[in-house]
Amino acid sequence: MTEKLEEIRKRAEIAIREAKTLQDLDDVEICYLGRKGELTGMLRQLSSLPDEEKKSLGSKANDIKGELERMLLAVRRQLLENRLTEIGRTERVDVTEPGRRPPEGHLHLVTQAIREVTEIFSRIGFVRTRYPEVDWDWYAFESLNMPKDHPARDEWETFFMDAPESKKGKMVLTPHTSNAQVRELERGQFPVRMINIAKCYRRQIDVTHVPMFHQFEGLYVDTHVSITHLRGVLDYFAKEFFGPDRAIRLRPFHFRFTEPSFEIDVSCAVCKGTGEGPDRQKCRVCKRGWLELGGAGMVHPNVLKAGNVDPKKYSGFAFGWGVERTALMKSGTKLDDIRVLYKNDLRFLKQF
Ligand code: PHE
């Protein structure tokens, strides 16, 4: 029996030493020391032996049991420690690592331009207004010195609303921001310093036109307003928006609601208004030294009258430009097709 005990101890010791996981170790323990384990079985048999033998074998068996238990404990600790080191290595959390940022958008190119234009004019006292983008014929045309059936209206390829007519005529989707002029004059508060930025609609769509676009409309009305003021304001804007080395020029033109009327050009950033490239050939960007921005002029007396303002007492100027055009000119972006502005293609929009 002594031999049997020694043999069990040897096997058990080897099994304990060879255990690779905590599970292996549990299995070994059950196998030898469990209720039906080999050593437990031996201890049970001892009770049937004569006293003398029972004593010596009993103490031997108990020694073996104690030894195996100590060994199990030591190896279990070691395995547990290994396991924790392993977890620490593979599942480490670095709390100082910066978090993952959700994708962040930015304002649309046109919105950015609207904000900048508003800001620039606010610095010289112009207040941004909001007037309807669906308005009566009276505000869009008639009060602007364009009587019904006047051919000048043709230029503003207008969308008419299918809505009941009123004293002020049909309803239209505003084809320009000039509808704000008489609406602002009607408020009767002077001096008028308005910057109206709104959507405009015209029946046009091709690579250089979209049916919905934006304009900003300036109106300044006070006593003794002259063309010099118009020039000063436009020059200020050009320098603030495009850069200090840019200048504007006025070219005679015709609008029904301003007299005299002008088209406004801004000097080209590349050739500085000379129209010449570095090789003494025509500037590749502008060809003429100047880029066209929009319209302007001194408010027509009939428009002042339509807004209940006495043209003998008050005078003023107005101007109206396209936001999209102005914004693209600033960034120097040449679009083959202006419609990409409104296609919501992130590959394009992200660049601004
Ligand atoms: N409303 C004109 C346009 O759409 C621009 C303009 C505004 C011209 C104000 C003169 C004065 O072309």
Image (cartoon, grey):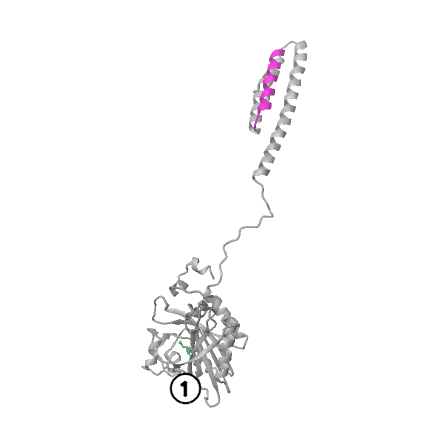
Where residue 187 appears, as percent x and y from the top left, is 48, 82
Q: Tell me the residue at 44%/60% (across/down).
A: 349
Is residue 316 or residue 310 the one in the foreground? 316
Q: Quadrant of residue 93?
A: top right
Along the viewing direction, whichever of 125 and 138 lies nearer the viewer? 125
Residue 34 placement (x, y as % from top left): 58, 22
Ligand 1 quadrant? Answer: bottom left
Would you identify the image quadrant in which residue 211 lies? bottom left
Residue depicted at x 49% and y 66% = 112
Q: Is residue 93 above or below residue 68?
A: below
Which residue in the rendered view is the most extreme toward the bottom? 312
Observer able to see residue 290: no
Q: Observer-nearest residue: 300 or 283?
A: 283
- The amino acid type, in three-letter code, at marker 1 is Asn
x 45%, y 70%: residue: 326
Decide which of 109, 102 is in the foreground and name it.
109
Q: Which residues are magenta?
A: 1-20
User: x, y percentage for residue 297?
Assistant: 44, 81
Q: Per the image, is 347 magenta?
A: no
Q: Is residue 63 above or below residue 349?
A: above
The question of residue 17 being in magenta is answered with yes
In the picture, measured across the screen, residue 155 lies left or right of residue 309, that is left
